[in-house]
Image: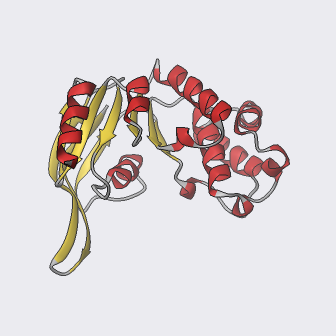
Amino acid sequence: MIKLLNLSKSFGAGSTRHVILDNVTLTLPSGRALALLGRNGAGKSTFLRMVAGILPPDHGRIVTTGSISWPVGFGGSLHGDLTGAQNTRFIARAYGVDSEDLLAFVDDFAELGTAFHRPVRLYSQGMRARLSFGLSMGIRFDTYLVDEVTAVGDAAFRRKSAAVFRDRIRAAGALVVNHNLAELRDYCDAALILEMGKITYYPDLNAAIKDHKAMLV
C-alpha cells in the first residue's frame, strides 16, 4: 500500500517555482501495475524517487507498507568505485537476501561479461541500467518502481527483461513510467496521470491513455 498524505513538492527559488505535487492526498491500490503518465517535465521521475524515499517532500508524507524497490534505472543506487559484483553483494546484505543467489541471477541476467567485475564508474549508462534492472528483478519486492529501463539493450535483451518483469508483477504491484504506450498496455492495467501538481487515479488504463493524449494536443 502507498498512501500520499497532503503531499507537496516543488523546485526553484524565490517566486519562480516548478510545482510537482500540490497538496495531494491519495491511496494507491495495492497489487496493481500502474502506468504513471504525464507530459515531459511533469515530475514523473521525481515522484518515483519520492516514493522510494530518495527525495523528501516539501510538505506532507508518504506512508508505505511492504518492500519497495529503488527506481530501476536510477544510477544513484550503485556505488561507482565498487564493481558490479561488489554492488550486488552490498545490496544483497542491505535487503537481507542470499548474496550468492543474487550474484548468480544478476551475472546471468545483465549480460555484462567481464565488466561485472569492473568498477561501475567505467560502465556506460546502458550497462548501469542493465545492472540496476537485474538487481531489482533479483529481489522479490512488493512494489517495483520502473522508469523506462525495459527499453535498454538489443531486441533479445528487451524481450528477456519484459518477460522477467511480467513474471514479477504477477505477485506484486508496480509504478511504471514508459513513453511507449503500447508497452504500457503489456504491463499495466490501471494508471495515474500527473498534471499541474495533481495526481488522478484511473482504474481503466485505456481511459487514462485517451485523456493523456488529449492533454498533449
Using the image as rendered, state which of residue 79 and residue 202 is in the foreground: 202
* Residue lying at 33% horizontally and 50% vertically, measured from the top left: 44
User: Is 108 situated above or below 7?
Assistant: above
Using the image as rendered, state which of residue 9 and residue 90 is in the foreground: 9
Using the image as rendered, state which of residue 142 and residue 107 is in the foreground: 107
Question: Which picture quadrant has residue 132?
Answer: top right
User: Could one spot residue 97 in this view of the protein?
Assistant: no
Quick check: 162 left or right of 44? right
Quick check: 30 left or right of 164? left
Residue 198: x, y in percent? Answer: 16, 49
Total marks drawn? 0
Quick check: 87 left or right of 143? right
* Residue lying at 63% horizontally and 28% vertically, measured from the top left: 160
Residue 197: x, y in percent? Answer: 18, 54
> Which residue sits furthest front?
217
User: Is 102 situated above or below 57?
Assistant: above
Residue 78: x, y in percent? Answer: 62, 55
User: Could one spot residue 140 in this view of the protein?
Assistant: yes
* Residue lying at 16% horizontally and 43% vertically, measured from the top left: 25
Using the image as rendered, state which of residue 114 and residue 38 is in the foreground: 38
* Residue lying at 57% horizontally and 56% vertically, measured from the top left: 75
> Which residue sits furthest bottom?
14
Question: Which picture quadrant has residue 119?
Answer: bottom right
